[in-house]
Image (spheres, rainbow, N blue to C red):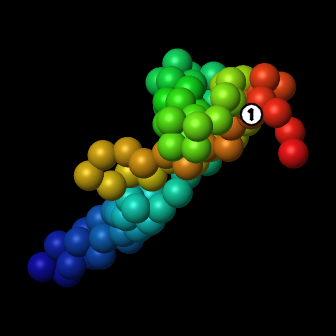
Amino acid sequence: MNNNVIFVLLISLVLLPLYASTTARLGGWIPNSNIKDPHVVHIGEFAVSEYNKQTKSGLKFDSVVSGESQVVSGFNYRLVVAADDSGTSKN
C-alpha cells in the first residue's frame, strides 16, 4: 500500500507541470515564429484588403512584420503588417 501511494504522488508530480504548461497556452497569445508561412501571409493580405474596402484606401500589402496566435475553438491571429501607401494621396 505504501508503494502505491508513493507511485501516485510521483506520477502527480511529473504530470502536473505538463498539464499546467498546456493549460497556460490555451487561450493565451503565443508569438508566431514563422511569419513567412503562406497561411500567415495570406491572413495579412486579407487584412489589408478588408481595410481597403472599409476605408476606401489603396494600401498594398508588403509583408508580415510580426505576429501572435491564440488557440481557442480555432485560431486567432494578431499580426503587424507592412503596407505601402505610395499610390494614395497624402494630406
Q: Is residue 63 left or right of residue 77?
A: right
Name the residue located 42 percent from the left edge and 48 percent from the top edge. Answer: 76
**The quarter of the displayed image where residue 19 is located:** bottom left
Q: Is residue 44 left or right of residue 82?
A: left
Q: Is disc 1 placed on a helix, strand or loop?
A: strand
Residue 14 visible in the displayed image: no
Q: Position of residue 46 (x, y in %)?
A: 49, 30
Which residue matches tag 1?
Answer: 82
User: Is residue 46 positioned above or below 90 on the image?
Assistant: above
Q: Position of residue 21 (x, y in %)?
A: 45, 61
Amino acid at circle 1: Ala
Name of the residue lying farthest toward the top: 38
Name the residue located 45 percent from the left edge and 52 percent from the top edge. Answer: 70
**The quarter of the displayed image where residue 7 is located:** bottom left
User: Is residue 10 positioned above or below 77 on the image?
Assistant: below
Name of the residue lying farthest toward the left: 1
Name the residue located 30 percent from the left edge and 70 percent from the top edge. Answer: 12
Q: What is the tally of numbered marks visible in this picture?
A: 1
Decide which of 76, 48 is in the foreground and name it: 48
Q: Is residue 16 left or right of residue 35?
A: left
Q: Position of residue 84 (x, y in %)?
A: 77, 27
Decide which of 41, 54 is in the foreground and name it: 54
Residue 15 visible in the displayed image: yes
Decide which of 13, 75 is in the foreground and name it: 75
Q: Residues within 10 Å of mark 1 (few under 14, many from 20)?
A: some
Q: Position of residue 15 (x, y in %)?
A: 34, 63
- Quarter occupied by the C terminus: top right
- Quarter occupied by the N terminus: bottom left
Name the residue located 67 percent from the left edge and 29 percent from the top edge. Answer: 58
